[in-house]
Amino acid sequence: MNHNVVTDRPTFVTHLECSISGERYDADRLHGLSRAGRPLLVRYDLAAVRARLSRDEVETRQTDMWRWRELLPVRGTENIVSLGEIETPLIPIPASGGPRVLVKDEGRLPTGSFKARGLVMAVAMARELGVKRIAMPTNGNAGAALAAYASRCGIETIVFCPEDTPEVNVREIAMQGARVWRVNGLIDDCGAIVGKGAAEGHWFDFSTLKEPYRIEGKKTMGLELAAQLGWRLPDAIFYPTGGGTGLIGMWKAFDELEQLGWIGPERPRMYAVQASGCAPIVRAFEAGEEHAERWEDAHTVAAGIRVPRAVGDFLILRAVRESGGKALAVGDPAIMQAVEDCARREGLLLCPEGGATLAAYREALKTGEVDETEQVVLFNCATGLKYPMPPAPDTLDRHAEIDFAAL
Amino acid sequence: MNHNVVTDRPTFVTHLECSISGERYDADRLHGLSRAGRPLLVRYDLAAVRARLSRDEVETRQTDMWRWRELLPVRGTENIVSLGEIETPLIPIPASGGPRVLVKDEGRLPTGSFKARGLVMAVAMARELGVKRIAMPTNGNAGAALAAYASRCGIETIVFCPEDTPEVNVREIAMQGARVWRVNGLIDDCGAIVGKGAAEGHWFDFSTLKEPYRIEGKKTMGLELAAQLGWRLPDAIFYPTGGGTGLIGMWKAFDELEQLGWIGPERPRMYAVQASGCAPIVRAFEAGEEHAERWEDAHTVAAGIRVPRAVGDFLILRAVRESGGKALAVGDPAIMQAVEDCARREGLLLCPEGGATLAAYREALKTGEVDETEQVVLFNCATGLKYPMPPAPDTLDRHAEIDFAAL
């Protein structure tokens, strides 16, 4: 039915490359981090893609993430486990944002978050490479996406999340066939357990950037954005940044698109948005550091970006700096205010992390970092329905006299 | 950006027609029910559409619901208040359904349910016709969609829902700018309040089928399905039936498509699925009645189809009978089992109403009403994330010795 998924494709992966040392690794073999302990990046024969594929041809294809197949690592079509990875819409928010502000609503993806992009790819590759058992630390949404795709193809999953992860996330993960554990700690504490179990051979480690393919799925956000905007990138992108896979992925996507000749050298300014209660990347950015130290006592309403330490810290910082953007922190009150305004005035219920991007945009507008004439894309990374909302009002007695004018 | 929404279009509406008497009503004027107290249907100059538009041309357009604009009632593009009404994916569920069973995942629409289709259309028409204040009874999802679209264009909304409506729905409605009240009763009790207030001139009544345009939005499910399946309709459709707007709308869509020459006379068997605890349509179907009496003491876990009385009862029954289908009731345990199986085996979290369609399909398979070689579409009308899920497991102490093999 979906030609993008069932069509056999040539694949163009040449090798994997250590993101810090440039060392080459074979494709088609199972890898975690590089020998230097850093993420591996997938490299393609882009000259061959360029000779074979035009952006016009891509535009004739069904608009889901598999239309980008020549820029994706999956070789065996039969390994793709799809739940309908649609192109997510761009929604104007003129009243709470501005005249040229668009929200990319990633909550429309399977399991309600952008994590589906990364996990559908990583699970397909794990399947291709024979993995039978996967473990992952998660603040909720990544675990849900992993559980969904892995259960669908019979791969066993064990998921660890911080003990205060919202109940709906934990239940969703369990419903979708994973064994899920709450842990008395934060996501990097969960990550330590996953790492230990992996070292002892109990499972394959699916932590953010510790396997090479989630980033390839996430980069489709950048590919999609380019196509949706008529192959002109926006002036600025505000991206909620925990592990940063999506930001790194988009930056990689833009580079690949330029090498294909589908876009020019222009780039959006990339704004990595964090919460004031957990802002290791912002601190490192401001201090001019290349790496970010662990953030102690992390706390924020935006659980998805409560990531005290990111293995791809230097890749995030590098992309932000090269783009002329910044790393920005916003407080929880500004986040919640942004969520409320956007829901009330635009009819669009953001998740707190999405709210953080709107809050950061508003702040950047005030400081003159952006201006209203610029085209800006904010990433709403998940449906707002998974998050706590203020209580609703009282009951009306239908047997009583109703004062309609007062309702 | 979205050409389907911003493109000026010719419109082809000729008039409205009473669904029971055939009496004609002017288009471009505000209407509720017909003088006979029944729903009004929108009629088009389909010969003119046929002369002007081909299905191949439709296929070149962006795949959202506005690609069908010649078959929709909105005349003024500027009245469309879009939140990104994407084409919803069809997802195979081979393990919990069968080899040719597809779920149309309507939870991907704005506000997480198929109600967005009807409400985006009804709000656009209300705006076109000058309505400033709207009230609605809802089991949750319709109210959320109304609130979102109406708030987005400054129309005031007052929403009434049964007092046991899940908290997440009520909060979502409130967040999106409606004034929302719980009522100690069921949806038709809420409807009575809305009707009284409308009669007294406090607001316009947006109850299911009491204004003519929600059905035009809902019919896009049928249009979309035809295009997605290569202009061949499936053998059977299982549809969760409360007010029945979608079922009636799809039946109307198929008729319009045939008049355009885009499909032939073949039709799917339409199965109206209800819960055993609230099955007025099933009772009327089995008794051979043309109308359905109110179901007393309605109760089911699938709140969206807890509709004791439907103003379009005769239209639902007529479509089901003409199609050679049936009205089917399933119990809550079978519904919950279907939700659980589909989540665990397919990674797809259905809402209870969507679960009801899977449960009904399974039952129909047992009785020989359908067989495995037939292509079947089940409608999952909303994201499963809005609904209660079983509790998740205990906390793991990261400081203790972890027995990895036992996890």
Image (cartoon, coloured by chain):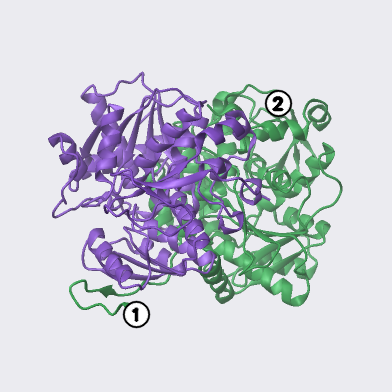
Chain colours: A purple, B green
Residue A316 image point, x, y percent: 28, 40
Q: Mark 1 points at which residue?
A: B405
Of A318 and A158, the residue lying toward us = A318
Q: Which chain carries label 2?
A: B
Outermost residue toward the right in this view: B265
Outermost residue toward the top in this view: A373
Residue B119 visible? The answer is: no
Q: Which image quarter: residue A83?
A: bottom right
Q: Provide the secondary structure element on which disc 1 rests.
A: helix
Q: Residues within 10 Å of mark 1 (few under 14, many from 20)?
A: few
Q: Provide the secondary structure element on which disc 2 rests.
A: loop
Residue A157 image point, x, y percent: 42, 68
Q: Which image quarter: residue A50?
A: top right
Q: Which chain carries label 1?
A: B
Of B97 and B404, the residue lying toward us = B404
Relative to A58, residue B161 above or below: below
Q: Residue B11 carries which label?
A: 2
Residue A377 image point, x, y percent: 39, 32
Q: Which residue is drawn at 55% across and 24% down?
A: B78
Of A65 and B329, the residue lying toward us = A65
Q: Check disc 1 and give the amino acid type.
A: Ala
Q: Check disc 2 and give the amino acid type.
A: Thr
Q: How far apart are marks 1 and 2 (CA)?
A: 65 Å
Residue A306 visible? The answer is: yes
Residue A256 image point, x, y percent: 45, 34
* B392 left or right of A360 in image: right
Of A6 and A350, the residue lying toward us = A6
Residues at discs 1 and 2 both on one chain: yes
Q: Residues within 10 Å of mark 2 (few under 14, many from 20)?
A: some
